[in-house]
Amino acid sequence: MNTMVILICVKQGVPDLSEFGDVYQLGYGLGEDKPPTSALVKKEFQRKIIYHLSPHEDSTLACMLLRPGPIKALTSARFVEDGEVEKVPRMYIKTSQDHVMKAEQQEAMIKRWPPLSVYELDSDHSPFFSTPFLLFGLLVKAATLHFGCSFTNPPS
């Protein structure tokens, strides 16, 4: 991949894993003579790239369940700014030890579609495995502050 393509991909939020070598297993759903339609991080790289801070038992199960991602969805996702989408409050949780979505890619996504708030976890790409209790705390905090949820008085 040339430098210009990598810079464009970084700006668009497409994961650049080139520092790890040839990590993708590509799928050719439209035929071998057509561009790839799906990508999956090869098994031998999954823990190192996606789950490096997660407990081994969780990453083992996650690797078993991991499925190919659709390339077109990753490269062409767009958000229509028609006013309706702005009615949905959103937050962003940056994962500071993420090898999939680098800090500059996360910042570009935040800038492109600003959330109400940005939080940060010292986590890999999968905070639900590597920092589940901290993630839960942030979600409760966001629900309380931004979305009007109350967790102190459960319904009777």
Image (cartoon, rainbow, N blue to C red):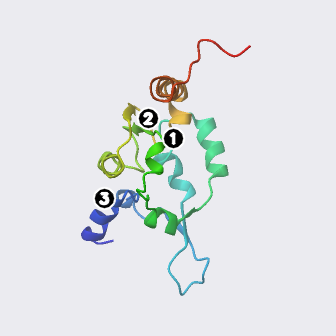
Work out whether residue 102 or residue 148 is closer to the camera in this orientation and state it. Answer: 148
Q: Position of residue 64 (x, y in %)?
A: 66, 50
In terms of secondary structure, where does tag 1 sit? loop
Q: Residue at x 40, y 60 (%)?
A: 14
Name the mark nearer the viewer: 2 or 3: 3
Q: Position of residue 102 (x, y in %)?
A: 35, 48
Q: Is residue 54 visible?
A: no
> The C terminus is located in which quarter?
top right
- Which residue is pictured at 45% across the width and 24% down the height? 145
Task: Reply above or below: 114 against 41.
Answer: above
Instruction: Compare residues 86 and 110 and report the one nearer the observer.
Output: 86
Measured Cα–Cα span from mark 1 to mark 2: 7 Å
Q: Which residue is mark 2?
A: 123
Percent of width and height locating residue 140:
52, 24
| Crowd class of label 2 (few under 14; some 14 to 19; many from 20; radius 10 Å) | many
Depicted 141 relative to depicted 82: above or below: above
Q: Which mark is residue 11?
A: 3
Along the line of sight, the residue nearer the viewer: 10 or 51 = 10
- Kind of residue sitting beneath label 3: Lys
Q: Which residue is mark 1?
A: 126
Choose top left, top right, bottom left or bottom right for residue 10. bottom left
Identify whether 54 is placed above or below 41: above
